[in-house]
Image (tube, rainbow, N blue to C red):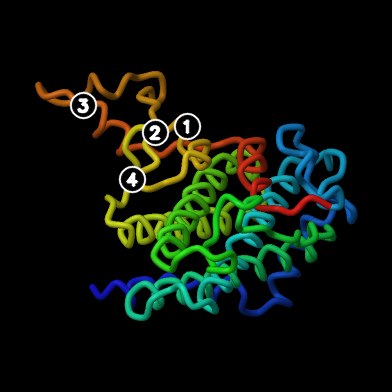
Amino acid sequence: MNIIKFLDEFTTDNLVAKKSSRRDMFGTFGSLGKKAVMSAIPFGLATMPAKMFAQDSGNAAVDALQLALTLEYLENEFYNRAINCTVLPDGRPRIVYEQIAKHEAAHVDFLIAGLEGAGVEPVAKPEFDFTAGGMFDPFLENGTDKETAYAQLLALAQAFEDTGVRAYKGQATNLQGTPFLTAALQIHSVEARHASEIRRLRGLKGWITGNERGAGMPEATQAVYNGEENITQGGVDVTTLGDGDPFGFDASTEAYDEPITGDTAVAIASLFIKAS
């Protein structure tokens, strides 16, 4: 199947259609409280705008959704800036980034409408710094050559997508028993498709081996991949499985994706959020 057609078939337009009915559905979740926002995370909090965080809302589902919205804000702005800068080449890279940008915009709209429909105030969109304090120059704003900027544009996309996939997985338990779980899983699978496609644009396999971040990824992104080297699933060492031919470490870690905690996701995102 043509990859662009493939991506297009997984748009999330269905998640942003019929806002009124969606708000009604989430209205059944209105007991969460109107002022609930994501809890403060000590690690990385010093670099985060204070207005982004408040004390724990007391509801894990709300905190999970607010975290998801913050990550979607980040991805949405990143892809919008990418497709409007001169770094991204025409052809397949641009088409892929433009399609992903549509998906991220749909995710933002969906999460905002869902939270509002539940009587919850969505966390405010922060101000982003995609240079991470001067470490990167993906949009060719600070004198970096175009080839380097493009490599950074791809590397940051990979880090953001891999973070999103692991973060959604990590918050699934907090959404158990709520109307949000199914939608969050729908978004999670699309984020995984994004991650695989971006990795292939970089000439990598579509999955993660061990805790390898992949060639050309800055050391600052290693937190995105730490923990992926896990070989124990359900209490079983999966490297011992296989009919007379046990799976090796590489194959075993590639076969299972690992979650990350909300703390880790916030710490990663904080690298790209301007301090107030």
In front: label 4 or label 1: 4
Q: 136 or 192: which is nearer to us?
A: 136
Mark 2–mark 4 contact, CB under 8 Å? no
> Disc 4 designates what residue?
215
* Distance of label 4 from label 3 (alpha carbons): 21 Å
Q: 218 or 160: which is nearer to us?
A: 218
* Distance of label 4 from label 1 (alpha carbons): 16 Å
Q: Amino acid at mark 3?
A: Gly
SS at mark 4 in the image: loop
In front: label 3 or label 2: 2
In front: label 2 or label 4: 4
Judge left or right: residue 235 versus residue 265: left
Disc sitting over residue 248 in the figure: 3
Mark 4–mark 3 contact, CB under 8 Å? no
Mark 1–mark 2 contact, CB under 8 Å? yes
SS at mark 1 in the image: loop
The local crowd at label 3, few if under 14, some if 14 to 19, many if 20 or more residues have their Cα within 10 Å, is: some
> Disc 2 designates what residue?
211
Q: Amino acid at mark 2?
A: Asn
Reading the chain from its start, which is encountered first: label 4 or label 1? Answer: 4
The local crowd at label 1, few if under 14, some if 14 to 19, many if 20 or more residues have their Cα within 10 Å, is: some
Q: Quadrant of residue 55?
A: top right
> Disc 1 designates what residue?
226
The local crowd at label 4, few if under 14, some if 14 to 19, many if 20 or more residues have their Cα within 10 Å, is: few
Q: 68 or 62: which is nearer to us?
A: 68
